[in-house]
Image: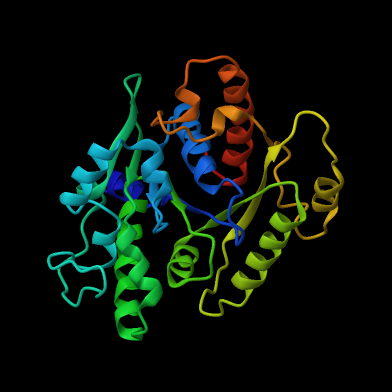
Amino acid sequence: MARGNAQAKQPKGQVIAVLNMKGGVGKTTITANVFRQFYLHKGKRVLLIDFDPQFNLSQTVFTQAIYERLKKEKRTILAVMEDTSEPSLYDTGKHSRPVPAPADLACKLKYRPDHPTAKLDLIAGDFDMVKFSLENSNSVLKAAKQRFVSFLGMAQAEYDLICIDCNPSSTFMTTCAISVSTHILVPVKPDRYSILGLKMLDTFVDRLTDIVKKPEKIVLLNGVPKSNYDPEVENALRSDPVFGPQTLASSLYETTLLNARPNYTGFATDKKIAHSKVLKANIAKIVNELHDALGMS
């Protein structure tokens, strides 16, 4: 009986949405590389979900052949949102097959032989998700959201941390991600437009009246130059009475290692090239601080 009670009290995994209302702030880069190191350094079970119809996260870490196989096998996030037995680019599914289990869709990216429970998995994105931005049937959207919530509930029982890479807009998918999240990680670059995107997001979340417990916000400065840097915008952010306390002390510094390359598929921190150790050390500091901000043991 005691053993059963211990299992029942096992905490659910944290859910963090990576989101800013402004594009180009590094959401996908952070999702891929920060949480790849999070899994590695903290030995956690981490699930990445590519929830952006542009599926940049999937393109970052999967080769075209692997992604096309996953798409053919219907192992993308689309299978969570609707029954894909009769797929259509324009029509949302009207059938009601059960929501697939996380293990049916997740693709294993990394694992640690020295830490058998640690793993890094990804559920691939899907361009067909764009149709949910065009759908105007409340019943269809409600059913899709219910499926997503149900899926996240199952995933929380299997993973310590679930990271959702979101698209930069106030769409149905954005509200879905926010509704299931315990935290929102907001990447901002040290420019006024990124800060404006942060403020717009803050207002948008506050206006979601159907979400009783709002996700906690964590702000991460990204793309900070190492030289010739004017800290005016950063200083204003850190001194802001609302956003200052939410901003991590550590910043992700600007580096060409994080730039996407057409001839490279995978995580930037796996590149065995000059300055990669410096990048890993930078991300490790962020991971340690983020781990504490999430309240993880």
Residue 241 drawn at (x, y percent): 82, 59
Residue at x-position 72% and y-position 58% = 193
The reply to whether residue 177 is visible in this rendering is yes
In this view, 90 is above or below 4: below
Instruction: Identify the image's colour scheme: rainbow, by chain, secondary structure or one colour.
Output: rainbow
Count every numbered label the image shows and give the total: 0
Of 228 and 163, nearer the camera is 228
Indicate the quadrant where residue 51 lies: bottom left
**Residue found at the far front of this picture:** 262
Q: Position of residue 4 (x, y in %)?
A: 28, 48
Q: Is residue 10 shown to the viewer in this render?
A: no
In percent of the image, x 56 and y 80: which residue is there? 209
Q: Quadrant of residue 215?
A: bottom right
- The answer to whether 94 appears left or right of 140 in the picture is left
Q: In which image quadrant can residue 92 be found?
A: bottom left
Rendering coords of residue 31 (x, y %): 49, 43
Residue 94, image x, y percentages: 19, 78
